[in-house]
Amino acid sequence: MLSQKAKETLNGWIAAAGPVVDKVLDKSEASWREARRQYMSGLEALFPALEDVDYQTERMGVVDSLVCVPQNLSEPHRIILYIHGGGYVHGGVEAYKALCGNLAKKLNAKIYIPDYRQAPEHPFPTPIDDVYSTYQNLLKQGYNPKNISLIGDSAGGAMVVTIMRKARDAGLPLPSSGVAFSPWADLTHSGQSAITRDGIDPICSVEFLNKLGRIFLGDEVATHPDASPVFANVQGLSPILLQLGENEVMLSDALRLGTNLAEAKVRTSIEVWPEMFHVWHLFAGQLPEADQAIDSAVLFIKNNQAG
């Protein structure tokens, strides 16, 4: 049961998404840049930056990253590459100051959030390539990969798997672990929950996701393994935790991703949270299930990093 405060925040999120939803559904003449700006402004107001965390912008690879560092952190032992969601189309780093600030404090970590380029101006595979460039840059800076973890939500959750695969294929060291919040793992939306949960998840509908996927993919097929990791070869990846909301239209596809990982002998943990919606983690401090899920993710990362 959502508290009154959480209900107000959820309604605020839905309202903030209005300009983006209208743009995706061809109901708006606003530019993509303006639609994103309005959405990010709304989310930043709902999930503001933390006062005891420093936020900076740093060039990482081919794009800038928002860097979150707890004010009492002297020498970061852990490095987190956080990959924001938004369907590869409409997300932004501004919405993640609170969530990543909380993660940075709980993990005593330095967190990089790449501000990757997005479709339709920069369709597949540019968003993925930008994030991969950021990971490469972390390695070039000399960070020990055993102290690096990937975390992502929605499209970013899918990219957690994809970035590991790209590193594996290039012969680069893999991060110690990955955590995917509500991963958008199959752009064909072939799982049963796309039917049974459609209209229940307040954040995502199948119609919206189908249009969003086509904007991102351009001329590429939805079954491309870099876009839909349920179709990918995932052998040899680092341990991965999947956290899924039971009310999500993406639930079945994310469970299929977990099966794919497990059958490839990847150490896989799957958590399904009853009655939770897409990326409920943003509600840290307002929703007990958000705080509990984050704490579980933090423990998973600590148990898999060096030292």
Image: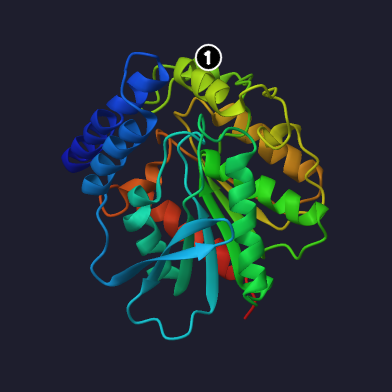
**Residue 276 image offset from top left, x and y in percent:** 40, 36
**Which residue extends farthest bottom?**
74
Q: Residue at x 74, y 49 (%)?
A: 165
- Residue type at mark 1: give it: Ile
Mark 1 crowd level (few <14, some 14–19, many ≥20, 10 Å Cα):
some
Q: Quadrant of residue 61?
A: bottom right
The C terminus, quarter of image? bottom right
Q: Position of residue 149 (x, y in %)?
A: 59, 63
Q: Measuring 47% from the left and 32% from the top, which residue is drawn there?
A: 246
- Of 301 and 121, nearer the camera is 121
Residue that appears at 47% across and 58% down: 64
Frontmost residue, 121 versus 216: 121
* Residue 1 can be seen, yes or no: no
Res. 201 in view: yes
- Is 100 drawn above or below residue 282 in the view shown? below
Q: What residue is pinned by disc 1?
A: 195
